[in-house]
Each structure stands twice: as C-alpha cells, then as structure tokens.
Amino acid sequence: MLLLLFAACILLLLILVTRFKVHPFIALLLVSIFFGFLSGMQGSVIISSIIEGFGNVMGKTGLIILFGVILGSFLEASGGAYLLAERILQLIGKKFIHAAILLTGYIVCIPVFADSGFVMLSSLNKTLANKAKVSLTGAVAALALGLMTSHVLVPPTPGPIAAAGIIGADLGKLILFSIPVSLFALIPSYFFSKYIGTKIHIDSEEQNIEPIQQSPPLFPVLMALLLPMLLIILKSIGDFPSHPFGEEHFFQIISFIGNPVIALLTGALLSMFLIKNNTKGPKKSDIITDSLKTSAPILLITGAGGIFGTMLQNSGIMEVVKEYFLIPELKLILPFLLSAVLKTAQGSSTVAIVTTAAIIAPLVGVLGIDTENLKVLAVLAIGSGAAVTSHVNDSYFWVICQMSGFSLKQGLRVQSVGSFLLGVSAMVAVLILSLFI
C-alpha cells in the first residue's frame, strides 16, 4: 500500500505542476503532507518531518545556491561571461566552430542559468555562424546543448548542488567526476550539431556584435569562476583517508576555505569587484537583489524536496522497497529513469533534479548507492536524466525557438532530439565511470 501511495503521490505531483500549474514548492509540500496522512503518520510526526526536512536541506545547500547565483549574476552583468565566450571562440577558431560554441556554452553556463546564457550569447552565436559560413541551426544546437550540459551536471549550478546536499554526496568529488562525464556527453552533441545543421535551414541576418564596453580583464573573471571550484576540490582531496595535507594547521585552513559555503562566498565576493562603482549600468545592490529573487524559487523547491524525502524516510517505505523491490542492478539506472520521467513530464530540469534527489535519498542504502563515490554517481545519473527531454513544457525550449526563429517542429527536431541524446550519452558515461571507481 505504501508503494501504491507513493506512485499515486508522484502522479499527483505531476498533475498539480503540469495540469493545474501549481508552483512546484506548493505541489511538493502538499504531496508530502498528503503522503504523510495517508501513510498513517501522526500529525506531530508530519510536522516534525516538515521542519526537519526543510531545515536540514537548507542548512546544507541554501547559502551555497545563493552564493552561486550571485556569482553568476555578477559575471553576466559585468560582461565577464560574454568575455569568456569571445576568448574561447578566438582560441579554438572558425574551423572547429561547433566545438568552440559547445565549449563556450558549457563554460558560460557553469555559473549562469541556461536560459540567461542563451539569451546573452545568441547574437554572438549568429554572427559566428555567418562568419564561419556554417548553418545557424547547427550553431544553435551546439550552443543550446553546451549550455544544458553544465546546467544539469556541473556545480555550482544550483540543481547539482541541491541534489548533492539532499543525497549527501561530496561536492568536491562531484565537481571532479562531473567533468569527464559532461565532456563525454559533449562528443555526441558535437556530431549531432553538425548533422542537424545539414538537415534544417533557417534564414538569419548578419549581425555585428559591438565590443563589450568597459569589460573586466580576463584574469579576475577566471579567478571568480575557477577559484571556488579549486578550493572545494582541494578540500575533497584533503579529506582522503591518506590525509595528503596532513591533519594539522594547513589541513584545517584548507577544510575551512574549501567548505562549499566559504568557497562560493569567496567567488561571489570576487565577482562583485568585476563591476566598478562609477560605471554605468546596474548597481551592485540591484544585482544582489535580483539574485535573491532568482534564487528564492530554487531554495523553496529544494527545501520542499527535503520535506518529501524526510516524509518518505519516516513512513517506513524503505523497508518495503528493500523487501520486495530491491534490484541492485538498477542502483544507478533508477535515479536516471525517474529524473527523465519528471523532466519530460513537467519541463524544469532543476525541479526534476531536486525532486528525484528527494525520492532517492531515503533509498540510497536499499539501492546500494551509499558509498561516497556511488552517491556522487547517483547525482550525476539524476542530472543526466534531467536532460531527457526538453520540449514544449520547458521554458528553455521556447527561449531557443523564439530567439533562433525555429518553428515548433524544428525546435522538436533540434532541441528535443538533441537533449535526449545528451542525457543518454551522459548516463552512458556515468555507467562507464562506475566500472572504475
């Protein structure tokens, strides 16, 4: 009965979000309470599950997500992200234009949301396609898939960070493992971009991109983006059983500055210096205010996901799954499939990642993914599923279509097929990686 109730709650969640357009935070909260009552939990246990679930997840991931959003907002507002894109394209050259655009989207989207990244780089992308004399369709596919890859797989993007906090995966290892998985997934995306460019033709006008006015130097941009990731990775290395940094003063310093909260705070503070007080444009206080508005829905959804996970834990459903449905061979496939179903049904990759993480978290022991490395791979499997499939219920899909001049049919052939290929390729990489760790 618990499993039937669980399935009914998942269906109810999808109906509330897709059919009745209920905000995912409210939908997750209502479904959690609904599950608690019908599973026979006492009112006091339901209340404690709500408080415990929300508080624990927010304590682990709330500030990390907020500082990551602030970092991305300042990189975007200062022109730093745009500068990165230009330098990458200059470095790789026109001969490998699709690879250059893929890599540009991939790097830019690490701190910036995919929607924002596409809007920001769309005009530059059109100009590059014209100058390199390649199909705009292929260039659009490359940019869209490059952005989406890091959006669902690479911290400090909010989705992977939230999933790591919910499941208890090490963020440093997640960064390390996400790089080979995501780069592997870019390879089929590259060939798909070149292929689809030969099949779909859309007209585009030549667009000239003006140089960025008062853009920041490249080194501070790289420092703001890469230093937090480096600090988190160093802390993860320092925590190895062999203690490569020892166990005294240096280790304690690394443990402090490499804590994801401190590392992302450092990156956010560095990014603020990219905008000078006397320059025209948005003020620092306005950018921070906008970042708070942007991060609030993500934080609420993440917290509600924690509530759902805690409610499942307290219901005893783990024992039922362990007794009747334990299939160790599905330990990484199940998170992928569940995330893919949620993504395809309701559109948001972040919602799919957070919701799946909340469902999987109580089952990590049952599924045999309770080691540090397997928890990280589970997060990457969830992220892979969250790419399958972007279509008409995904706001990112419509941003791509509207800014690129795609019809609905063309958008489905480019973004929907491409995102399916991306997600499956990433999952293949996760399974390959699981054979070696």
Image: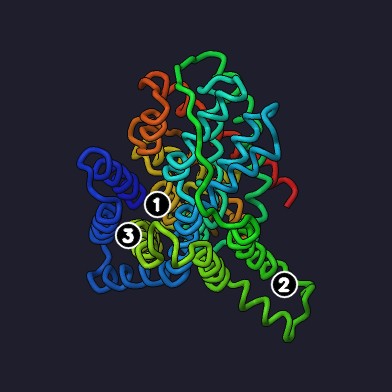
Mark closer to the chain start, 3 or 1 = 3
Residue at image coords 56%, 26%: 129
Mark closer to the chain start, 3 or 2 = 2
Q: Nearer the viewer, mark 1 or mark 2?
A: 2
Label 1: few (<14), some or many (≥20) within 10 Å?
many
Question: Which amino acid, by three-letter code, is at mark 2?
Answer: Gly
User: Which numbered tag is attached to residue 111?
Assistant: none
User: Which numbered tag is attached to residue 293?
Assistant: 3
Disc 1 and disc 2: Cα gap in Å?
31 Å
Question: Which amino acid, by three-letter code, is at mark 1?
Answer: Thr
Q: Is residue 103 left or right of residue 127?
A: right
Residue at image coords 63%, 66%: 232
Residue assigned mark 2: 238
Q: Position of residue 30 (x, y in %)?
A: 24, 56
Q: Front-most of 404 and 141?
A: 404
Q: Residue furthest left?
A: 20
Residue assigned mark 1: 355
Circles 3 and 2: CB atoms closer than 8 Å: no
Q: Position of residue 358 (x, y in %)?
A: 42, 56
Secondary structure under badge 2? helix
Disc 3 and disc 1: Cα gap in Å?
21 Å
Q: Is residue 165 above or below residue 247?
A: above
Secondary structure under badge 3? helix
Q: Is residue 176 above or below residue 59?
A: above
Mark closer to the chain start, 1 or 2 = 2
Circles 1 and 2: CB atoms closer than 8 Å: no
